[in-house]
Structure formats: structure tokens, C-alpha cells
Amino acid sequence: MKTIASLDLGTSKIVALIAEIDSYGDMHVIGIGEVPSKGIEKGQITRFDSAVGSILRAIKEAQEMAGVKPNSVNLGISSPILKSQNEKDTINISPQPVEIDEAQIDRIIERTTTRAREEGYEIISAIPRKFILDDQEGVLDPVGLLGSKLTAEVHLVKVGISLLRNIEKAVTSSGLNIAGKYPSIMASAEAVLTQEEKEEGSLLLDIGAGLTDFILFMEGSPILTGTIPMGGNSITKDIAHFMKITTEQAERIKVEQGFALSDLVNDSEKIKIKPRGEDKETMVSKKSLSEVIQIRLEEIADSVLGYINAQGINMSTINAGLVLTGGSSKLAGIKEFFERYMDLPTRIGNPTGIIGLKERVQNPSYATAVGLLKLKSRVVYGYPFSYQNVENPMDKGKVKLANWLDKIKSFFREVL
Ligand SMILES: Nc1ncnc2c1ncn2[C@@H]1O[C@H](COP(=O)(O)OP(=O)(O)OP(=O)(O)O)[C@@H](O)[C@H]1O
Ligand SMILES: [Mg+2]
């Protein structure tokens, strides 16, 4: 049986998962390591030794549970220094229609990545969104079809290069090889979105502690990917500030009594707090707590909407609606808040499609870690989600081979 592992370096916690893939291609999670995150914040290394220590502890915990040691991991990348763009390119293949093969698609990807290259950034993902073969639009996978001119639109995600190198250094210093690196939100999407949602148009928000990652799917593939430097910690800090209480107290109150939509909270409901520097506890209204939470959520929602508007995307094309995941999606009333604020049907996304330790991993906080296991064998239009190391031809060969294996595997899965 094949063993795979994933590593999610969150602001609040580090999660390492180890899974086995059986002969049917089903994934069994056999090891979980979760430790509080030290030396990592908003996707970046803030203190090297602490980060390595946390990674080592998470891996050790997962390894002890699984009874096997992972050699390499799929790594999630999330950072405010992350951005996406779509590039279109056309190649003329031959005057007479000939069979399209993968080399031609590689060429288009190569050309779009070259064009998207930017100093200080590295492209970590390149996904062909759609193809036009001569005048035929809407081609999902042109391989094997006949044509003389091929156009593709490619969705590219890039991240700050030194941020990336520091993360890689921390992971490799923990004795692990990096099998693949993927935008964290693509992993979360893999864990919580259905194929139908991706095709009909859906927006996914992974609201964590330090960051809110978002991805917009249209016609089955991503069209917009990004990160906002706010999350559950921002809400907690706001509560601490307005109520003059400790962060610890604010976090507890948020989780136990918080509600995301203030006009649904009864005016008469009160909660006990103990302000800093005061000996006695006092009562505040639950509604005022809710107002503080709501203001920050509006700011997060507005930022995401700003990115969508800037792309000229009409919200009414997001037919399948909004899916919320990440730890902060457990906040009471958050579904109701977003449903109203974004005017989209909304659901909370729990990771699915895994066997083993379900009760622990079927939790929105685990969306990225679970998705990272699934991305390994994920193919979009015949291409892997992550187009690794565009500059390195050796790695490209590997991607191609993996791609074929995946195709064969998914073929057998369909047949069975
Ligand atoms: N029941 C709950 N109600 C409200 N908030 C919650 C609840 N449970 C967890 N959270 C919040 O979820 C956040 C942690 O989420 P998550 O584990 O997804 O973050 P992370 O992956 O460590 O961080 P990031 O992705 O932002 O770097 C914290 O801010 C925490 O307060
Ligand atoms: Mg996270």
C-alpha cells in the first residue's frame, strides 16, 4: 500500500496527516499530528527554530499513531503574498489538423508561465482552465483530438519567493522532503467542494486564525485565488480590545457565546466578563459582542468582494453559492451572516472522501490537511493541480509521469 502525508502550517495549529491508499484508490487516514503553531504566522516563518520544533512535533505525533514514517509531504502554501492571474495563449500546430498531445499543452503552459513570471515571486500552480481547438470552444481535454491551432486559458498562482524558501527550509530541516506544494485553498477546495459546485460556480472561503483564503470556481476550474490577512484571531483581538479583556478570555467568549449576526441576538441576553484591572466581573450584552464580531466579518467579506469585483465577475454567476470552511466557519451564525451579506446560498464545508479517523478529520479546521492528501492524485483536464518547478525540466518529467498514472487510476476507478 502506498503511504502519503500532508502538512498544513496554520497560524493556530500545525497538522500532519499520514494516509494509506488502498488498491481501489481509497484513502485511509492512519495518523494525525496536531500541535499549536509556534514560529509560524499568517503562512510565514516568524521564528525558524520554533517553526522547525512545531513541525517535528506534529510529524512525530502522526508517525507514532500511524506506525510509519513519511519521507515526503504535500505542503500547503498560504500567504498574503499570494496572487493569481489568468493568461491566454495560442499555438499554431500545423496547417492540417493533427492529433493534439500533451507536449503541446505543456508548451502553452510554459508560455503562459513565462509571461506571468515576476521578480520576487514563484509560480506554484498552473491549471489550464479551458481550451479552444481551432474554432471549437469549451473543449475540456484536447489530448487525442485533431486540430491545427490550440488556445488555452491558464490559471496561475504565485507567491513571494523568500517566504516560500523559508517555509521549504523549515520543512526540509525537519527531515522531510517536499513531494508537492500547493496553494492551501486549492487543497481545501479539494476536500470540501463537490464537482457540481465547481462546475456551476462556487466561492470557497477558508477562514482560519490569521488568514482568510478564497478561491472562485467557474466551469469546473479556479478563476480567482487569493488571501486576506484577517481571520478568527482578528475577531478575538477586536473583542479583547472593545471589552478590555485578555485575548484568552476573548477567545473563550467568542467560541462559547459569539454569534455572527447581531440583529438575531436578543437584547436582553447578557454575558459575564472580567475587564483588565478590575476585581469584579461585569455584565455586557451578547448583542454588543455580536456587533464586534459582525464588523470584522463584514471587513473580511468586503475584501473578498473587492477582489471579485476587480475581476469584473458578476456575483450572480456564482450559481452554486458560497462554501465556508476553516476553523472560524464553526462560529455560530456565520452561515446566516454570509448568506445575507453576500446574498448567496451558503453552506459549511466539512472535508469528505476519506476513510479512517473520520470523526477527527471531518472538521472544517482540517480542510487544508485533508485536501493536501487528495491533491496528490487530482487531475484537472488531464493536468495535475500543481505545475511544479516550472524552471526545472527534471521535475516536469515527474509531473508528467504522475499525470499518466493518475489518468490510468481514475480510468480504472470509473470502470469499477
Ligand atoms: N467554535 C468556534 N467558534 C468560533 N471560532 C472558532 C471555533 N473553533 C475554532 N475557531 C477559530 O478558528 C480559528 C482557527 O482556525 P484554523 O484551525 O482553520 O486556523 P489555522 O489554519 O491554524 O490558521 P490560518 O489558516 O489562518 O493560518 C481560530 O481563530 C479559532 O478562534
Ligand atoms: Mg488554515
Image (cartoon, rainbow, N blue to C red):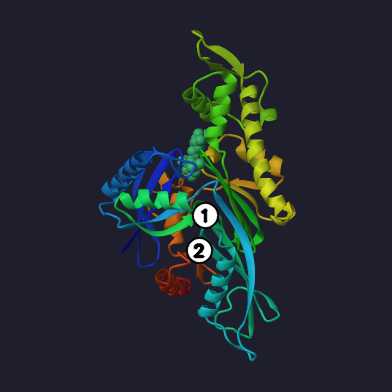
Question: What amino acid type should be assigned to the residue bearing mark 1?
Answer: Gly
* In the displayed structure image, the side of residue 145 where residue 45 appears, left or right: left
Please identify the quarter of the rendering in which residue 88 is found: bottom right
Name the residue tied to disc 1. Answer: 120
Local crowd at mark 1 within 10 Å, few (<14), some, or many (≥20)? few
Name the residue tied to disc 2. Answer: 385
User: Which numbered disc flags the more N-terminal residue, 2 or 1?
Assistant: 1
Contact? badges 2 and 1 (CB < 8 Å): no
Can residue 206 be seen by looking at this rendering? no
- Residue at 54% of width from left, 48% of height from top? 81
- Residue at 72% of width from left, 45% of height from top? 343
Residue at the front extreme?
119
- Residue at 37% of width from left, 51% of height from top? 169
Can residue 58 be seen by looking at this rendering? yes
**Mark nearer the viewer, 2 or 1:** 1
Dot 1: element: loop
The answer to which of 10 and 396 lies nearer the viewer is 396
Expressed as whole percent of the image width and height from the top left, the position of residue 3 reads 32, 60
The answer to which of 369 and 349 lies nearer the viewer is 369
